[in-house]
Image (tube, helix red, strand yellow):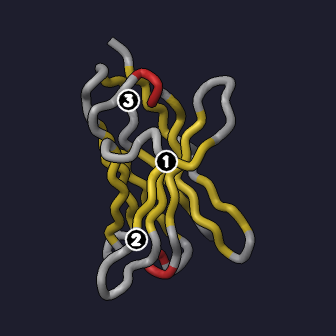
Amino acid sequence: QVQLVESGGGLVQPGGSLRLSCAASGFTFSYFAMYWYRQAPGKERELVATITPDTPSGGFTNYADSVEGRFTISRDNANNTVYLQMNSLKPEDTAVYYCNTLMDLTNYWGQGTQVTVSS
């Protein structure tokens, strides 16, 4: 049974940092790309960051324009965990952040973790 459990959200001031974690289980984690999405109140869920399975030269990453240069996605295959390091946070980063993977045409989601950026 695939499970994704996010943690690490909270309240942070503008300019601050947070690191989100997503613990995965129930599948061979290293084989699959992992994604972070977010959904702000009244808005559609949007893709924030992607990391592919590792290759000999490392996993490939991709970011939404709105977070490029501020957020970093990484993975620890030994511990079946994907991270999202978020720096220079802005009020518009406020959202529920979700971990995701796609397997056999089925999307799997975690329960989400709230990130609030406010002074």
> Label 2: few (<14), some or many (≥20) within 10 Å?
some
> Alpha-carbon neighbours of circle 1 within 10 Å: few (<14), some, or many (≥20)?
some
Using the image, tell me which numbered label, if any, was put on residue 86.
none
Mark 3 or 2 closer to N-term?
A: 3
* Quarter of the figure with residue 7: top left
- Which amino acid, by three-letter code, is at mark 3? Gly
Label 1, label 3: how many angstroms apart (C-alpha)?
Answer: 21 Å
Q: Is residue 20 above or below residue 52?
A: above
| 24 with respect to 119 (left or right) | right
Residue with the mark numbered 3: 10
Residue occupying the far front of the picture: 65
Distance of mark 2 from mark 1, alpha carbons? 14 Å
At x 61% / y 54%, what residue is drawn? 109
Residue on which the image places disc 1: 64
Q: Residue 86 versus residue 104: which sits nearer the camera?
A: 86
Tag 2 and tag 1, C-beta contact below 8 Å: no
* Distance from Cα at disc 3 to Cα at disc 2: 28 Å
Residue at 49% over, 81% down: 31
- Which residue does the numbered mark 2 point to in the structure image? 60
Say which amino acid is labelled 2.
Answer: Phe
Judging from the image, what secondary structure is the residue with disc 1 in?
Answer: loop
Asked if residue 112 lies left or right of residue 73, the reply is right
Image location of residue 42, percent across then percent down: 68, 24
Circle 1: residue type: Ala
